[in-house]
């Protein structure tokens, strides 16, 4: 009877969204199936609940602008079919974002369960990855790969993304912990999360989690003395680990220092800018970097790694948006993120920033800091994290925060 009542209220939309954490671990197929089911559930909800989109006209206007940019991008794309498929993928994530927003706003039970399932999933991933580090094999039999400096993968198998997953879901758990005033758990969770991300040998994930943690603790801890002590403590522990472990020292310090001025990422970045110069307004088309980059005209970029300029994406979300969607897509992304940054900046200057703002600001920095190498904004797995963040931000902005978890 309870399930029937629940179905009649949300048509399983909230239950489906509770599968989001585990789907991120299971991979692209699980994410795609979940997105499809969420889409149908949202349609059913909109038919039977005329108030579902109440006070959401701004998101409707945004969707119109987004669809217009996607249509023009497909029209001028170098690979129209590829850009069309990718556009559908972006729409599915907007639907996930909208669905999360609706459930966050309307159901305390959903908020509670959503965070608990994220915590369970993330702790499982962290423990499994520690097992893989110490025993060279995780509980599923996945071994430590010898490529890229002995990378860990945890339950992700052949996909070397465990560090990225932990860093990009870390602050979801922090929101819950500060809500429950679990400070000891927060410190412990921060320490063990950061250490395993570093041990995973993912440089960008490690640097960004480390940096965003410093920002969060600097904002969150009230005493200036303890701010400095906390930052010095975290930094000292990290450097001791890096200097004592030869593999980590080589991967995080020696190799980056050796190739800092010129490397294959620089080749990707320069190629992205050149593609933008040739397609300034609407870009070369979504997910076309991998095809356009091989053009012989881009062999002249100023790097000795010009022959390594091609990849599936340019490894920076801003350069990716600039090269594949042009000024049209870049203006939309920058407008949203500038709005978010100014929102937080005003609260910090006015000293009106609360604990939830501090977490979400650190999360914003981790995902959108421009001077970092990233996964693709338009990929199935990596792209969804940015929309999850937007759902958190706009929920918090409505002053609902998550106090009622």
Image (cartoon, rainbow, N blue to C red):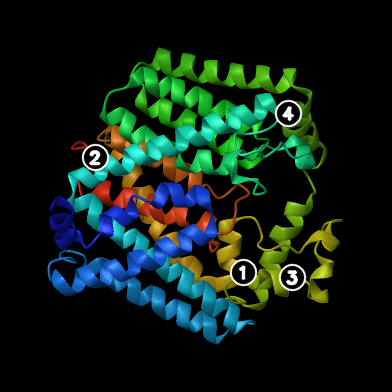
Q: Which circle, 1 or 2, is nearer the viewer? A: 2
Q: Position of residue 212 (x, y in %)?
A: 49, 35
Q: Which circle, 1 or 3, is nearer the viewer? A: 3
Q: Residue at x 29, y 53 (%)?
A: 15
* 68, 190: nearer the viewer: 190
The residue carrying pointer 3 sits among few (fewer than 14), some (14 to 19) or many (20 or more) residues within 10 Å by Cα, namely many
Whether residue 306 is visible, yes or no, is yes
In the structure shown, which secondary structural element does the residue marked by tag 1 occupy?
Answer: helix
Residue that badge 1 annotates: 323
In the structure shown, which secondary structural element does the residue marked by tag 3 occupy?
Answer: loop
Residue that badge 3 annotates: 293
The residue carrying pointer 1 sits among few (fewer than 14), some (14 to 19) or many (20 or more) residues within 10 Å by Cα, namely many
> Could you give the CA–CA distance between mark 2 and mark 4, rounded to whole angstroms?
38 Å
Residue that badge 4 annotates: 248
> Could you give the CA–CA distance between mark 3 and mark 4, rounded to whole angstroms?
32 Å
Going from N to C along the chain, the mark reached first, 2 or 4, is 4
Residue that badge 2 annotates: 402
Q: What residue occupies the far bottom of the structure in this picture?
A: 75
In the structure shown, which secondary structural element does the residue marked by tag 2 occupy?
Answer: loop
Q: Which circle, 4 or 1, is nearer the viewer? A: 4
Q: Which circle, 3 or 4, is nearer the viewer? A: 4
> Could you give the CA–CA distance between mark 1 and mark 3, rounded to whole angstroms?
10 Å
> Could you give the CA–CA distance between mark 2 and mark 3, rounded to whole angstroms?
44 Å
Going from N to C along the chain, the mark reached first, 3 or 4, is 4
The residue carrying pointer 2 sits among few (fewer than 14), some (14 to 19) or many (20 or more) residues within 10 Å by Cα, namely some
Vertical relation: 239 (above or below) 364 = above
Whether residue 210 is visible, yes or no, is no
């Amino acid at each position: 009877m309870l399930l029937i009542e629940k179905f009649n209220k949300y048509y399983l939309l909230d239950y489906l969204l509770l599968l989001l954490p585990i789907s991120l671990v299971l991979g692209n197929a699980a994410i795609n199936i979940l997105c499809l089911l969420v889409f149908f559930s949202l349609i059913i909800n909109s038919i039977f609940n005329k108030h579902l989109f109440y006070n959401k006209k701004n998101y409707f206007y945004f969707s119109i602008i987004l669809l217009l940019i996607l249509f023009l991008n497909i029209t001028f794309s170098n690979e129209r079919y590829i850009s069309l498929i990718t556009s559908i993928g972006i729409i599915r994530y907007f639907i996930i974002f909208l669905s999360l927003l609706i459930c966050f706003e309307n159901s305390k039970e959903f908020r509670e369960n959503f965070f608990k399932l994220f915590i369970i999933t993330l702790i499982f991933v962290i423990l499994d990855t520690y097992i893989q580090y110490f025993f060279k094999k995780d509980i599923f039999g996945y071994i430590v790969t010898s490529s890229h400096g002995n990378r860990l993968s945890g339950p992700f198998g052949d996909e070397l993304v465990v560090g990225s997953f932990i860093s990009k879901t870390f602050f979801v758990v922090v929101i819950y912990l500060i809500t429950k005033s679990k400070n000891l758990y927060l410190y412990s969770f921060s320490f063990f999360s950061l250490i395993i991300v570093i041990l995973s040998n993912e440089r960008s994930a490690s640097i960004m989690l480390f940096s965003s943690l410093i920002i969060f603790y600097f904002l969150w801890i009230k005493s200036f003395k303890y701010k400095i002590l906390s930052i010095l403590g975290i930094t000292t522990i990290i450097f001791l680990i890096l200097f004592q472990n030869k593999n980590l020292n080589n991967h995080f310090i020696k190799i980056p220092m050796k190739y800092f001025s010129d490397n294959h990422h620089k080749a990707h970045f320069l190629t992205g800018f050149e593609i933008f110069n040739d397609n300034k307004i609407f870009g070369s088309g979504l997910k076309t970097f991998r095809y356009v980059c091989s053009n012989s005209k881009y062999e002249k970029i100023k790097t000795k790694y010009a022959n390594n300029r091609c990849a599936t994406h340019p490894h920076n979300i801003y350069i990716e948006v600039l090269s594949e969607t042009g000024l049209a897509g870049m203006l939309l992304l920058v407008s949203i993120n500038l709005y978010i940054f100014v929102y937080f900046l005003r609260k910090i200057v006015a000293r009106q920033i609360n604990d939830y703002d501090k977490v979400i600001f650190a999360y914003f920095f981790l995902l959108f800091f421009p001077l970092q190498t990233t996964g693709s904004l338009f990929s199935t797995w990596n792209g969804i994290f940015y929309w999850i963040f937007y759902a958190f931000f706009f929920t918090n902005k409505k002053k609902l925060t998550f106090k009622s978890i």
